[in-house]
Amino acid sequence: MKLALIPIDNRPVCYNLVNDIANIDSDLEIILPDKKLLGSLYSNADTDGIIQWLEKLDEVDAIVVSLDTIAYGGLISSRRCKDSVEEIKSRLQKVKKILKKGKKVYAFSSIMRISNNNVNEEEKEYWNKYGTQIFEYSYKFHKEGNDFSDVPKEILNDYLATRYRNFQINKMYIEWLQEGLFDTLVFSKDDCAQYGLNVMEADILEHTIQSKNLSGMVKTGADEIPLTLFARAIVNHALKQGIKATCLSENIDNIKAPKISVKFLAPLHKHLISNYEDISIEKSVKAQIELAGAVVAEEKEADLVLIVNNFEEQQGEIVMGVKTLPFSGQFSLPKKPYIIADVRFANGADNIFIDKLFNKSIDFDNFYGYSGWNTSANTLGSLICVGLVRHFAQNYNEEAFRKLQMVRFLDDWAYQANIRQALNGKREAVNGKRKEPRADFRKLTKMMMPFEKRLQKILRISPEIKYKFPWKRFFEIGITIK
């Protein structure tokens, strides 16, 4: 299969991870625009360059498109971009003409988030003074109909105008969906609460889609959506071609949507809501499975078992000092293919759970992947993509899979749950931007060594590994394995 993908931005989890997952199947060809064309924390994507790349794109079986990248220059740029509705629509019309040339298109667009803090690192400049007040205004307006705010009128009006512009663009995408341009269209809710203007917009978009009986949907999450759509494209292609999955035994003429069973390690608490999300972890799991083109099933019928290390009181977050009960029970690994979603903590692994996992004998014939990346939705979407790509792999690359797992464990466990805390030190907020200590790569490499050595024994590979901070902050890390 040949698949093209336009990422949200140039972060490793948005760009490199796509390649790493695709490498699991040597018969799967993934095509990405040059990383230099994509946006970063403080720079917008080269939209003209990406449009030219699209125009020159060879024939592909499917394309996954971040509409924010083309419309605004990226996910972060969608909150900062000053272009008018007319300018954005003009740019998008060029893309529409290209996509109409028979490509199978899986598209996604964000519903602009409302972060509950006074940090403008990823927002407009005024967020450093009025971020929490704008969040409170949004929350109370939705919940109580209260439109009073202490935020200066010109700032609130600018914020609402940006929201309205993005909302108008999203409504236009529904028109394109109705015209048949998209095979699937997803609106993503990023960093959302129970109430807010973003939740109101999501309800309107969802009602419009349902009333017209269209193949669109609203999903909680953001960064993982392209990977979930990547998985959906793989599943749809396999079903269309009658491709037999690597772990299926039924006749090739009887190929059906892959079945995934879910095993919560804290089943009595699956109704709890994750940090940065507005639905229970149980609903989040089901939504990610269905978006990927799979179905939920009982374990005896399942092709994959999804093990979820969920939280019991509230989701913890080590870097933010949010405590929760670590995993304290026992678990067994299935004797059929399984994947592991570690969501007891946001932004990093559960150290005690990892120790228990590593003390077991991992059978690489059945172990199909681990993730503990950032939010619950991020973890689930990326993990399910890995599991399904391996599930349908026609030319499975064991070395590529082990390298991918090395990256995930080094990032989600070694770095996020352990080393990041030591590197952070004391951080100050200067004009709403986090001022972080200077990155010391020698110190980082030295601190990662004990984790590398343990993983080398478990994964049975000894690659050359290099690290970097791609956005010059400690929130994310770049890991290169040679």
Image (cartoon, grey):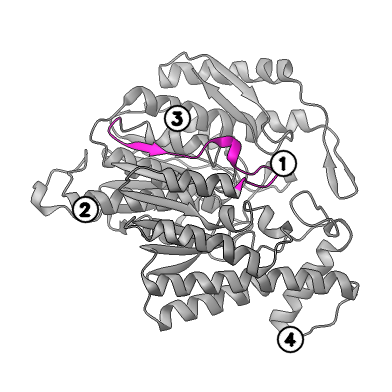
Rendering quarter of residue 440: top right
Marks 3 and 1 in Cβ contact (< 8 Å)? no
Q: Position of residue 423 (x, y in %)?
A: 76, 28
- How packed mark 1 is, by other alpha carbons closer than 10 Å (few <14, some 14-19, many 20 or more), is some
Amino acid found under the numbered disc labelled 3: Leu
Q: Earlier in the sequence, mark 2 or mark 1?
A: 2
Amino acid found under the numbered disc labelled 4: Gly
Marks 3 and 4 in Cβ contact (< 8 Å)? no
Q: Which residue is mark 1?
A: 319
Q: Secondary structure at mark 2?
A: helix
**92 over 355 or under it: above or below:** below
Say which mark, if any, is on residue 239: 2
**402 over 157 or under it: above or below:** above
* Left or right side of 198 for 400: left
Amino acid found under the numbered disc labelled 2: Leu
Residue at image position (18%, 49%) is 241
Q: Earlier in the sequence, mark 4 or mark 2?
A: 4
Q: Position of residue 105 (x, y in %)?
A: 38, 57
Measure the alpha-carbon separation of dots 2 and 1. 42 Å
Q: Position of residue 67 (x, y in %)?
A: 53, 57
Q: Which is the main secondary structure of the residues drawn in magenta?
A: loop
Q: Which residue is mark 4?
A: 145
- How packed mark 4 is, by other alpha carbons closer than 10 Å (few <14, some 14-19, many 20 or more), is few
Measure the alpha-carbon separation of dots 4 and 2. 47 Å
* Left or right side of 304 for 331: right
Q: Which residue is mark 3?
A: 404
Q: Secondary structure at mark 1?
A: helix
Marks 1 and 4 in Cβ contact (< 8 Å)? no
**Front-lying residue, 329 or 460:** 460
Which is closer to the viewer, label 1 or label 4? 4
